[in-house]
Image (cartoon, rainbow, N blue to C red):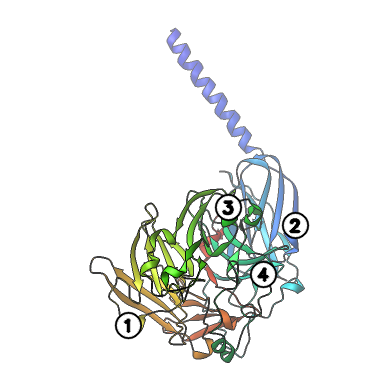
């Protein structure tokens, strides 16, 4: 009998608690306040602050008034106060939205609306010249990201119509280059104000060809260097910034060309180690300082984790070019991870890409002219930039081709068993778009290429044979342009 009473009591308790829970959820969640703000007065971004009468998760569904295409922010956690970020909005446009309490009862607000301001005057940049190719669909659903190295520096993301859809500015320093992280953020290399009349403004083809004799760099910093790193989330918030030139270790004060972040959060970048040598032993006179390159690994506080120095793996006694290129022997200008987490490095002076073991530091192979792979000699590249692994698993690069005077995007399949390289993409740009320095080529999801002719100030979408479909014109030299896929924003919003 006592056992039956205990079971009955347990059942009654469960029923009571279930009734209480159901009663709780049947109570309406009410919106106490809704406040809209435009961070930094950006017309393409709206923050919605929402306060409820009691805790709940929610999301915001939004769309352009009259459009059937809808978007929704990601779900918030269960709480009373919420902040939803509406990103990549179109300027001077009316939007409608609903606040949806994400619970099994599916409560939602009435349909509300807001109108985005007109684009800020300083962001009304005429990127597109209607007399040049301007197929707005060629870029697909993504954006082209460009950086400005003067002060104030900025990162801008531009759509196929030539409109800025995302923008971040830093007032005290320029932005040399930016790239994406595994954490869904943006990593930026920052450079101090340095007027560089040779490299900083677009040039005609005659000027580009006439300056080929000019040394590639002037000092350790040059046009390609940086002194600070910052990580920015997609709302424009700076997560951290380190100014290496203000730290004690002088050798790590200047970065060179490129940087990336790994899954553990460490920063991998190129730096400029020097080597003091008695050149009289090499046919020269006196003691000289050789300029080299290396890989530097830092944490987000700027502390050194690891270093790789090319001079530790290079026999200068057997180098016939050491006197000629003593000032800048290798000019490493691009750094990525291979699929096995070892490094791939673009070595511009050697016209090669090297694979470097990330643990031992051993140079595993060299690819390019006079390298370890058999390849079609018509695909030899020269002073290449912006190496990357495309979506087809091919090694891709931008060929500055100092010998051919014809810039192009190239991709290869490397067979490390037979040590052969097969050319897959060969997309030459017109002679008028030749650039002797910098530049980039990336394969887009739609099969086109996003290519940058840096010295002419042009970012283009081309076919894989090099036909130009779309051009973006900058009043400055963009080091490269990276593609921002629609999926990159999944942490903040998605299509409904």
300 left or right, relative to 98? left
Among numbered discs 4 and 2, the one appearing first in the sequence: 2
Residue 202 in percent (x, y) is at 62, 83
- The local crowd at label 3, few if under 14, some if 14 to 19, many if 20 or more residues have their Cα within 10 Å, is some
Of the pair 230 and 491, the residue shown nearer to us: 230
Q: Nearer the viewer, mark 2 or mark 1?
A: 1
Position of the N terminus, as image quadrant, is: top left
Among numbered discs 2 and 1, the one appearing first in the sequence: 2
**Disc number placed over residue 74 in the picture, else none:** 3
- The local crowd at label 2, few if under 14, some if 14 to 19, many if 20 or more residues have their Cα within 10 Å, is few
At horizontal 50% and vertical 56% (from top left) the residue drawn is 296
- The local crowd at label 4, few if under 14, some if 14 to 19, many if 20 or more residues have their Cα within 10 Å, is many
- The local crowd at label 1, few if under 14, some if 14 to 19, many if 20 or more residues have their Cα within 10 Å, is few
Q: Nearer the viewer, mark 1 or mark 4?
A: 1
Secondary structure beneath dot 3 equals loop
Measured in 3D between alpha carbons, the distance from the residue under mark 3 to the one under mark 4, in whole angstroms, is 20 Å
Q: Which residue is mark 4?
A: 90
Residue 179 in percent (x, y) is at 54, 63
Measured in 3D between alpha carbons, the distance from the residue under mark 1 to the one under mark 4, in whole angstroms, is 48 Å
With respect to residue 218, does 202 lie above or below? below
Residue 167 can be seen in this image: no
Q: Which residue is mark 2?
A: 37
Quadrant of the rendered structure where residue 358 is?
bottom left
Q: Which residue is mark 1?
A: 377
């Amino acid at each position: 009998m006592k056992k039956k009473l205990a079971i009955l009591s347990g059942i009654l308790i469960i029923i009571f608690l279930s009734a209480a829970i159901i009663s709780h959820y049947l109570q309406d969640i009410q919106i106490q306040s809704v406040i809209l703000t435009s961070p930094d007065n950006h017309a393409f971004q709206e923050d919605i602050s929402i306060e409820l009468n009691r805790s709940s998760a929610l999301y915001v569904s939004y769309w352009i008034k009259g459009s059937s295409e809808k978007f929704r922010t990601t779900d918030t956690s269960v709480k009373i106060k919420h902040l939803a970020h509406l990103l990549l909005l179109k300027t001077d446009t009316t939007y409608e939205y609903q606040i949806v309490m994400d619970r099994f009862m599916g409560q939602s607000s009435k349909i509300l609306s807001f109108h985005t301001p007109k684009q800020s005057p300083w962001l009304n940049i005429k990127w597109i010249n209607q007399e040049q190719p301007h197929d707005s669909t060629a870029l697909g659903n993504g954006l082209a990201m460009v950086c400005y190295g003067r002060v104030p520096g900025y990162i801008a993301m531009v759509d196929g119509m030539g409109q800025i859809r995302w923008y971040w500015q830093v007032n005290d320093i320029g932005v040399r280059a930016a790239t994406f992280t595994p954490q869904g953020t943006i990593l930026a290399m920052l450079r101090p104000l340095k007027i560089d009349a040779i490299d900083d403004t677009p040039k005609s083809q005659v000027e580009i060809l006439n300056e080929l004799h000019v040394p590639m760099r002037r000092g350790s910093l040059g046009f390609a260097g940086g002194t600070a790193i910052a990580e920015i989330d997609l709302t424009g918030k700076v997560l951290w910034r380190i100014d290496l030139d203000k730290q004690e270790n002088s050798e790590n004060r200047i970065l060179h060309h490129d940087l990336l972040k790994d899954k553990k959060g460490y920063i991998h970048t190129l730096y400029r180690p020097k080597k003091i040598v008695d050149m009289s032993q090499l046919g020269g006179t006196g003691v000289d300082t050789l300029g080299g390159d290396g890989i530097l690994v830092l944490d987000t506080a700027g502390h050194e984790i690891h270093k790789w120095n090319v001079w530790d793996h290079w026999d200068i006694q057997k180098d016939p070019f050491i006197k000629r290129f003593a000032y800048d022997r290798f000019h490493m200008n691009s750094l990525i991870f291979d699929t096995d987490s070892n490094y791939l490095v673009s070595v511009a002076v050697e016209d090669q890409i090297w694979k470097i073991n990330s643990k031992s530091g051993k140079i595993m192979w060299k690819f390019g002219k006079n390298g370890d792979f058999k390849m079609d000699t018509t695909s030899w590249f020269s002073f290449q930039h912006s190496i990357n692994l495309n979506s087809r698993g091919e090694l891709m690069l931008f060929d500055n081709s100092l010998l051919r005077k014809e810039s192009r995007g190239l991709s290869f399949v490397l067979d490390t068993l037979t040590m052969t390289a097969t050319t897959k993409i060969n997309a030459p740009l017109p002679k008028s778009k030749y650039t002797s320095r910098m530049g980039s080529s990336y394969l887009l999801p739609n099969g086109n290429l996003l290519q940058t002719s840096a010295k002419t100030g042009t970012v283009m979408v081309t076919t894989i044979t090099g036909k130009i479909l779309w051009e973006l014109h900058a009043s400055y030299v963009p080091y490269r342009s990276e593609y921002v896929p629609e999926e990159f924003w999944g942490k903040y919003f998605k299509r409904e």
